[in-house]
Image (tube, helix red, strand yellow):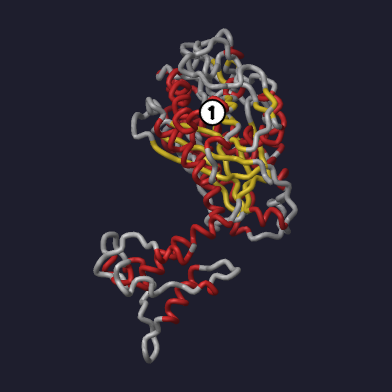
């Protein structure tokens, strides 16, 4: 592969004989086969190999490598043939080394409206049990919609002191509870000071689509009632969306990559995908990844009501969220967190971890179309599916199950169906699809984390969870959406799809570990 890289250098210029196939100088700097025999090559070895072979008389090197600014797009003729070869080789070596690092899942944790553990989540979604009800946290008089999937019986003092909990928003508390469960399953006691591992190689990428909206609203009331001097100094750190990742990093002393990203309802999905690439790139060996959300507060809820995006089936909460059904009238907001421990395979094997599944691909694209509506042909989502399969090295026919975004809105479900058809072609009719939002509601930035966990559970259980509340077929949503009852099926490859306001599309490909 490396020798082929040198023979197929793109962008060769006639002024550069080492990059011109018609020149007698072409191929002069090929590397002998014995250099690669039976070993993994670091980029610095290639640099020193070329320096040794091109040493100038009396010492020194003719390569002059060391500054990326030596190369500019469209100015390949300014590069020496050796430097051009090195830069080509660098890209090839980095990609080869990334492909050598497999990424697996060793732990999962979930907080949701159907239960405060992965076991409770899976039991509910696989049996079609809905966690949606009337809102209990505030007076809904005057609101168009009055329903939500509220987390129930959540006690943060199981995880930390009440004093510490007051210093963080509810979405961060959900993230901590989910992460604790995931780490316990993974067998990684990161809170133990005597735990032996390189904490610089352990990172956190847990995101929120909206962040600490509840804390912001509380302090907004203080501001208008008591004035600016009475605002809490903790307001900003409780409000900003990156503090789920920040608090987890401090709690577990994880000193590797640490941040949150924002892509609305695709945030959790993108976090898992980006964490996967961090491990592939050798930036980390372990990542906590997923999403958390706690936005069921009057201001945020009123905003979604004004958009007429949410279901108004206020007298029938259990049947309000009905993905892909012809009678759907909007999504139902929910909350919670879904966090995974994802890990480099050899790191997991060395410590004897139980491997739940493998992450094999990730796709992220933009619709460039509308602030809230998906692309009317599903083009962006389709491309994200293709991208995830390309990275995984899988054909469309390999896909067994898709956990769809399936929000129960008119536009999303129609256009997502088109996207799946465009990406998978004729195989789209053979794939088992479900949206578990009929049971869990739409957890916004946490949806990708929660639904990725559902994919892992489905792979291991050999069971496709149902799309509940499906009564009337919609001709625009004519795929196999596993209506109302779970179905046994061997699942080797599962995709999780999440889409977000702003045209954000995310797809993560999971595979049975063998």
**Residue 467, quarter of picture:** top right
Q: Residue furthest bottom?
A: 58
From this view, report whether residue 52 is shown above or below residue 194.
below
Residue situated in front as seen by the camera: 96 or 104: 96
Image position, residue 108 (x, y; %): 66, 40
Residue drawn at x 67%, y 30% is 154
Q: Residue furthest top?
A: 315
From this view, report whether residue 501 is shown above or below residue 65.
above
Residue situated in front as seen by the camera: 212 or 321: 321
Task: Check disc 1 and report its element: helix, strand or loop.
Answer: loop
Residue situated in front as seen by the camera: 26 or 179: 26
Image position, residue 356 (x, y; %): 69, 42
From this view, report whether residue 61 is shown above or below residue 416.
below
Q: Which residue is mark 1?
A: 404
Residue situated in front as seen by the camera: 101 or 149: 101
Residue 409 shows in this picture: yes
Image position, residue 469 (x, y; %): 59, 14
Q: Residue furthest left?
A: 15
Q: How many labels sit on residues?
A: 1
Residue 216 shows in this picture: no
For the residue carrying disc 1, how many other residues have a C-alpha within 10 Å: few (<14), some (14-19), or many (20+)?
many
Residue drawn at x 63%, y 22% is 466
Residue drawn at x 49%, y 35% is 266
Image position, residue 43 (x, y; %): 48, 68
Is residue 54 found left or right of 291 in the rendered image? Answer: left
Is residue 367 found left or right of 340 in the rendered image? Answer: left
**Residue 367, quarter of picture:** top left
**Residue 75, quarter of picture:** bottom left
């Amino acid at each position: 592969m490396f020798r082929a890289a040198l023979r197929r250098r793109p962008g060769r210029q006639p002024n550069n004989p080492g990059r011109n196939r018609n020149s007698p100088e072409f191929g002069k700097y090929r590397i002998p086969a014995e250099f690669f025999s039976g070993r993994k090559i670091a980029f610095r070895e290639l640099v020193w190999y070329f320096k040794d072979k091109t040493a100038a008389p009396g010492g020194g090197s003719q390569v002059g490598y060391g500054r990326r600014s030596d190369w500019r797009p469209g100015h390949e003729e300014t590069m020496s043939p050796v430097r051009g070869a090195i830069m080509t080789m660098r890209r090839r070596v980095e990609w080869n080394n990334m492909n050598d690092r497999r990424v697996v899942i060793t732990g999962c944790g979930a907080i949701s409206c159907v239960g405060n553990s992965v076991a409770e989540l899976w039991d509910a979604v696989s049996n079609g049990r809905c966690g949606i009800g009337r809102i209990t946290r505030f007076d809904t008089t005057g609101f168009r919609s009055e329903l939500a999937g509220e987390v129930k019986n959540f006690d943060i003092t199981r995880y930390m002191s009440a004093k510490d909990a007051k210093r963080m928003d509810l979405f961060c508390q959900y993230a901590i509870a989910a992460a604790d469960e995931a780490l316990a399953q993974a067998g990684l006691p990161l809170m133990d000071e005597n735990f032996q591992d390189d904490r610089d190689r352990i990172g956190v990428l847990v995101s929120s689509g909206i962040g600490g909206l509840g804390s912001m609203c509380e302090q907004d009331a203080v501001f208008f009632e008591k004035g600016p001097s009475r605002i809490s100094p903790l307001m900003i750190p409780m409000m900003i969306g990156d503090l789920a990742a920040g608090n987890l990093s401090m709690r577990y002393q994880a000193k590797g990559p640490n941040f949150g990203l924002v892509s609305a309802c695709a945030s959790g999905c993108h976090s898992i995908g980006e964490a996967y690439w961090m491990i592939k790139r050798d930036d980390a060996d372990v990542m906590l990844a997923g999403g958390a959300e706690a936005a069921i507060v009057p201001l945020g809820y009123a905003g979604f009501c004004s958009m007429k995006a949410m279901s108004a089936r206020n007298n029938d909460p259990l049947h309000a969220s009905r993905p892909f059904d012809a009678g759907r009238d909007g999504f139902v907001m929910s909350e919670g967190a879904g966090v995974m421990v994802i890990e480099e395979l050899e790191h997991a094997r060395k410590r004897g971890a139980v491997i739940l599944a493998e992450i094999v691909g990730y796709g992220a694209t933009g619709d460039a179309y509308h602030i809230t509506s998906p692309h009317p042909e599903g083009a962006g989502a389709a491309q994200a599916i293709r991208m995830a399969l390309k990275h995984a090295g899988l054909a469309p026919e390999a896909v067994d199950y898709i956990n769809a975004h399936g929000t129960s809105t008119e536009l999303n479900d129609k256009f997502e169906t088109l996207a799946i058809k465009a990406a998978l072609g004729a195989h789209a009719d053979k794939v088992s699809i479900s949206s578990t939002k009929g049971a869990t509601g739409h957890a916004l930035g946490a949806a990708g984390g929660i639904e990725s966990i559902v994919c892992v559970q489905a792979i291991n259980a050999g069971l496709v969870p149902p799309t509940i509340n499906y009564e009337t077929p919609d001709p625009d949503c004519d795929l196999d959406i596993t209506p109302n009852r779970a179905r046994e099926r061997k699942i080797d490859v599962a995709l999780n799809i999440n889409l977000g306001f702003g045209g954000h599309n995310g797809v993560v490909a999971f595979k049975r570990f063998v």
